[in-house]
Image: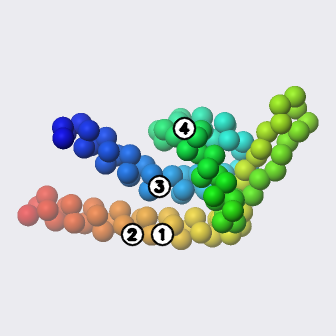
């Protein structure tokens, strides 16, 4: 396997692991799916709509998101927003993530100096 492919796969795995946190964080303010996809791309998170929408449905089923339909425009849109429970879970995920990053940096620094 070539180096570029290995690095690309590793980067995809890192992104997958943080997508839930990114989505919950960005949806602290209500957004519709297409707007969320665009904002994520602006932030450097490439996600396809056929990946995002199942995730949104799953997070809603878990009680982390709530949704509502806006039908006053010519094209109805489903808006999503992080619930209070979702905010609580996000806080804990951020703590776990930061602890993991801290431990990883520590090990990498030790290996760098070793």
Image quadrant occupied by the N terminus: top left
Q: Against 106, is 33 above or below?
A: above
Please provide percent x and percent y for residue 79. 76, 46
Pair 2/4: label in front = 4
**Tag 1's secondary structure?**
helix
Name of the residue lying farthest toward the top: 74
Mark 2, residue position: 99
Say which label, 3 or 2, has the lower sequence index: 3
Q: Position of residue 112 (x, y in %)?
A: 13, 58
Q: Which mark is residue 18?
A: 3
Q: CA distance from mark 2 to mark 4?
A: 29 Å
Question: Compared with residue 76, is residue 101 higher up or lower down, i.e. above or below?
Answer: below
As measured in the structure, the alpha-carbon distance from the residue carrying label 3 to the one carrying label 1 is: 13 Å
Whether residue 55 is visible, yes or no, is yes
Instruction: Decide which of tag 4 and tag 1 comes sooner along the chain.
Output: 4
C-alpha distance separating marks 4 and 3: 15 Å
Q: Residue visible at 50% across and 64% down?
A: 94
Residue position for label 4: 48
Q: How far, Cα to Cα, is label 2 from label 1?
A: 6 Å
Which image quarter: residue 63? bottom right
In this view, the mark in front (3 or 1): 3
Identify the residue position indicated by label 1 in the image. 95
């Amino acid at each position: 396997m070539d180096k570029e492919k290995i690095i690309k796969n590793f980067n995809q795995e890192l992104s997958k692991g943080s997508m839930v946190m990114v989505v919950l964080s960005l949806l602290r303010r209500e957004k519709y799916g297409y707007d969320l996809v665009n904002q994520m791309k602006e932030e450097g998170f490439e996600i396809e709509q056929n990946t995002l929408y199942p995730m949104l449905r799953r997070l809603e089923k878990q009680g982390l998101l709530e949704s509502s339909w806006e039908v006053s425009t010519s094209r109805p849109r489903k808006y999503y927003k992080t619930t209070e429970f979702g905010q609580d879970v996000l806080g804990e995920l951020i703590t776990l993530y930061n602890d993991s990053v801290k431990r990883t940096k520590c090990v990498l620094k030790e290996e760098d100096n070793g």
